[in-house]
Amino acid sequence: MKNQDCIFCKIANGEIPSATLYEDEDFRVILDLGPASKGHALILPKEHFADLYELSDEAASKALVLAKKIAAKLTEILKCDGFNIVQNNGTCAGQTVFHFHIHLIPRYKNDSVGLGWTPGTLTSEDKDEILAGFGK
Ligand code: AMP
Ligand code: ZN
């Protein structure tokens, strides 16, 4: 199902032109217009899911297989030195377009891509709370 006001629905379904690297029945893979690095691509499902929480199990399993395939092809073409797969959910996590997508970000030695965090400490309170949530 498509969402009328969603730009990625329109791109994924070909209503808005894009630099398409790959397309099948379920997905379109495009070049990001604001790339973090050369070759930054986005995997867009044709069906509208706002985020990971809404994503169907079927689309989820196909999306990672596709990510693997496109990352391998981009690595071959660009001779990049590494790869990040990024997927943001929620404004606080950096999501700006609320149609599920996976970022494929080629990495190059000494590039200036800013991904990462300062490691904290796993406290026993946090650990106990989270494990309890899983019934452990
Ligand atoms: P996120 O912040 O995870 O929601 O990622 C949204 C991404 O979509 C950003 O990297 C944008 O540069 C990219 N983007 C937004 N609009 C377009 C567009 N029309 N075509 C290609 N990429 C886009
Ligand atoms: Zn959409």
Image (tube, rainbow, N blue to C red):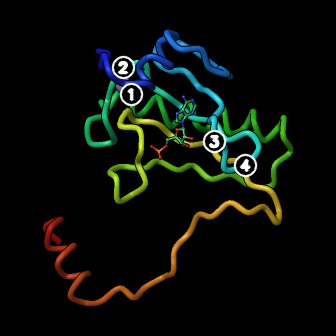
User: Is the C-beta separation of discs 1 and 4 under 8 Å?
Assistant: no
Left or right: where 28 falls relative to 7: right
Three-letter amino acid code of the residue under disc 3: Gly
Residue at image location 49% in from the left, 28% down from the top:
44
Q: Answer yes or no: disc 2 within 8 Å of ligand 2.
A: no
Instruction: Look at discs 4 and 3 and give the one toward the viewer.
Output: 3
Residue located beneath label 3 in the image:
34
Quarter of the N terminus within the rendering: top left
Residue 9 quadrant = top left
SS at circle 2 = loop
Neighbourhood count class around disc 4 (C-alpha, 10 Å): few under 14, some 14–19, many 20 upward: some
Residue at image location 46% in from the left, 36% down from the top:
101
Residue located beneath label 1 in the image:
59
> Which one is earlier in the sequence, the residue at label 1 or at label 4?
4
Three-letter amino acid code of the residue under disc 1: Ala
Residue 97 quadrant = top left
Residue located beneath label 2 in the image:
47
Instruction: Look at discs 2 and 4 and give the one toward the viewer.
Output: 4
Residue located beneath label 4 in the image:
37
> What percent of the width, then of the height, locates residue 89?
36, 49
> What percent of the width, then of the height, locates residue 104?
61, 42
Instruction: Look at discs 3 and 1 and give the one toward the viewer.
Output: 3
Residue at image location 83% in from the left, 37% down from the top:
76
